[in-house]
Image (cartoon, helix red, strand yellow):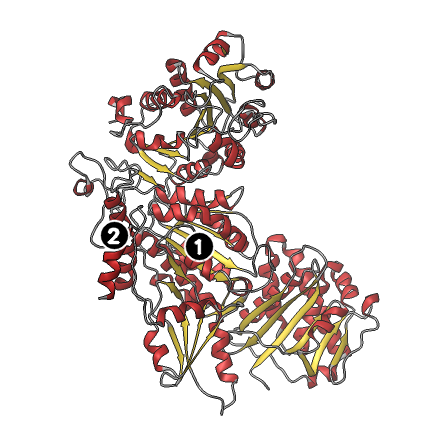
Amino acid sequence: MPADFNWAIGGEAGDGIDSTGKIFARALSRAGRHVFTSKDFASRIRGGYTAYKVRTSIEQVESTVDRLDVLIALTQRTVDENIDELHEGSVIIYDGERTSMADLEIPDGMVGMDVPLKSLAEEAGGAIMRNIVALGAACEVTDFPIEHLGSSLEKRFSDKGQSIVENNKTAAELGAEFVAENYEAESSEFEYELETTDEDYVLINGDEAIGMGALAAGCRFYSGYPITPATDVMEYLTGRLERYGGHVVQAEDELSAINMALGAARAGARSMTATSGPGIDLMAETFGLVAQSETPLVICDVMRSGPSTGMPTKQEQGDLNMALFGGHGEIPRFVVAPTTISEAFWKTVEAFNLAEKYQTPVYLIADLEMAVTEQTFPPEAFDMDEVEIDRGKIVDEDEIDEWLDDEGRFRAHAATEDGISPRALPGTTDGAHMSTGLEHNELGRRTEDTEVRVEQVQKRQRKVETAKEREDWSPRAFGNPDSDNLVVSWGSNEGTIVEAMDLMDEDAPDFQFLSVPYLFPRPDLTDAVEEAEQVVVVECNATGQFADVLEHDTLERVDRVNKYNGVGFKADELAEEITEVLQ
Amino acid sequence: MSSETRFIDFKSDKQPTWCPGCGDFGTMNGMMKALANTGNDPDNTFVVAGIGCSGKIGTYMHSYALHGVHGRALPVGTGVKMANPDLEVMVAGGDGDGYSIGSGHFIHAVRRNVDMSYVVMDNRIYGLTKGQASPTSREDFETSTTPEGPKQPPVNPLALALSAGGTFIAQSFASDAQRHAELVQEAIEHDGFGFVNVFSPCVTFNDTDTYDYFRDNLTDLAETDHDPSDRDAATDRIMDGNEYQGILYQNEDSVPYHEAHGVTEDMTDIPDGAPENATDLVREFY
């Protein structure tokens, strides 16, 4: 018996596929099994094929595979879409009483179980519960104790009243009984038995992990505009943020969302917004202001297929260039991309700390598959005692004197040695100051003075240099560290690549795998790249955006002549500088 | 400090670069007077400004301030106020900032009824870019980019505010220093979004909507029988094509956004680690 079991339910959008899949995933999780889910969905409310897949094992599962052992098919298309994943012995549960399913042909070697889902659901109290009947049937096929499904149903429906919970449990039991009575032989021959353990697992998706990370980190203000696949961050925080004295605002657009978050951050709240590609494009307008005014802000981009509206419900890691280089002018920033769902929690906490320590915008980059995948973790993966908060250089009324100039004015953008200036939150006596997107002096007042311009540019860049020295930007290493082959990836591909290593033939070349969660600043992989005979970069985009970055980093550097004081090059000046460089 | 704050305390040591005679001088003086008269001081005041001649105001005043990007000052003010309701938040901008690039935010800020004041220096022209039509320019107002006039009706900001559920809608004239300061003060004191559209003439590029024009054509509502609590009366005035100063409409039952949403304390203090009972957040996912 293979170690993992793969299950799916598919139908049309509006059939309750997502909700049913989650109920089954939760039942498995509550039975002490590990779970990894994936979704196939379209950007519409009704109609169109949609499916929810669950992979489960006693061991932690980090990815999905193209194999299905049990399929609940509410439509013919569900079978057609998944035919390549089904195999000999796979069970297909369907409702032959449904006109469109009456003629369903079960492929050779597979087992069809015709269960009157709708009729049994009606017997239990309502046709709406037909998917639950199917879940009960699946439990019977896999010898999975139905009380765990009951426990999941209680969690899902308890706020709707005990009678709803009981009806759903009855529906599940009717499904199980029907299989026991009509498909006893087939059921007992089925090769999987879903064993249970006493472990307690957390079943969480990437968006929720980001939201929980924000709460753990002391985020108090969130403003956003709903967009797939980032909306779950906002929905998770709504209601919960308020418990901690915070607030969620649904803004009129992403332009407003980032500006509200900026305002809250300037007032001293830990503040965040989350969006996806189209929203990031709009937020780019204000991104430069956030950096130029040295405001700590976490901006989460849950990537989806672009460009433009692209494929809103499909996966892509296409926004890396935007995160690294987006916005006019030159803007210091941090870019962090968690590599797993539990890391999404920790990297969110870290993003808030980085933002405040360095008074810089932090892009927190996740992606659609991470956002919508539900995965189990032991609760220790989210050990709240490990959460550390560092608010950086906030000065209070006792400390502010040392940051006032001769005329008693607060030096909010003081060009310090480490580049980090003192931060006085509004309300602090004697701290009143201006901040602006214009180039400014240390008081925050507009200037076009060439020397001050250079001083402030260097001061902002120095924050990045300081961060490079002070923080750990290491990649996560897997595989054979002595191998001649190097595989590099970033973001949510980590688990899949680690499992792919296991699946590769024994005589296939081995490799070291570096999973990079920090994209700026990022680890210096020059040595690793130079030592390797072959380097492969795996990423979910067409052009290899991180591969470009890696090639850039490891190239022998060109010499540079730069000028950024607001005045263009002069011929005599260039003659001198080029001579100097070339000598 | 509050009790002895004078309006001069809100003035920075930076000299304005506005053209001599610009309406924005008077507008800003009134804002500073109103802030001082309402017991505020620079350390508890947050001024947000956008882009344009008006946007420079944050530099010339002394307070906590952010000079943002074009048109987005109101969302910034909203965030500031939500994060710390104890701060006095004043947003300033021009007709381009508020009624063109920022018009979407204007409507929604009015709807939200955040407890802040919004002072718009309306000169019916784009001054900083040297004289193009603004959203409040007259239909036949000839400029470098509209040689025959915009040929579209000007935005009526008061009507926009009223239709969006505005709870305090006023208009003032930069040159009538006393009335202007009083009206901004009323906007500050209002529990909710206090909106004041200020006629702030551009002496360089607008030879139509001049000081003389407003002096000759402005009716002070205080000298009429207008009842600001009467929304229908406000609608009539706002739509009748005349120029008014005074409070067009005020809803005395206004409940500001942060109160409606139960936000009572500032959001700046957080624990040194995860919040108490944070483990419950994890348990929710069992």
Q: In which quarter of the image is residue B152?
A: top right
Image quarter of the N terminus of chain A:
bottom right
**Mark 1 sits on what residue?**
A326
Locate residue A489 relative to residue A171 in the image: left or right: left
Q: Nearer the viewer, mark 2 or mark 1?
A: 2
The image shows residue A71, relative to residue A439, as above or below, that is below
Locate residue A556 relative to residue A281 in the image: left or right: left
- Camera-side residue of A254 and A426: A254
Crowding at mark 2 (Cα within 10 Å: few <14, some 14-19, many 20+): few
Q: Which chain carries label 1?
A: A
Which residue is located at x 75 percent, y 73 percent? A178
Locate residue A136 relative to residue A379 in the image: left or right: right
Residue A246, disc: none
Residue A198 visible in rendering: no
**Mark 2 sits on what residue?**
A572
Nearer-N-terminus badge (2/1): 1
- Camera-side residue of B144 and B14: B144
Which residue is located at x 45 percent, y 46 percent? A285
Image quarter of the C terminus of chain A:
bottom left
Q: Which chain carries label 2?
A: A
- Camera-side residue of A166 and B102: B102
Residue kind at label 1, given as amino acid type:
Gly
Residue A186 visible in rendering: yes
- Camera-side residue of A167 and A27: A27
Instruction: Pinpoint residue A353: horizontal percent, then vertical percent.
Output: 33, 56
Q: Distance between the residues labelled 2 and 1?
A: 33 Å
Secondary-structure class at tag 2: helix
Instruction: Pinpoint residue A548: horizontal percent, then vertical percent.
Output: 44, 68
Secondary-structure class at tag 1: loop
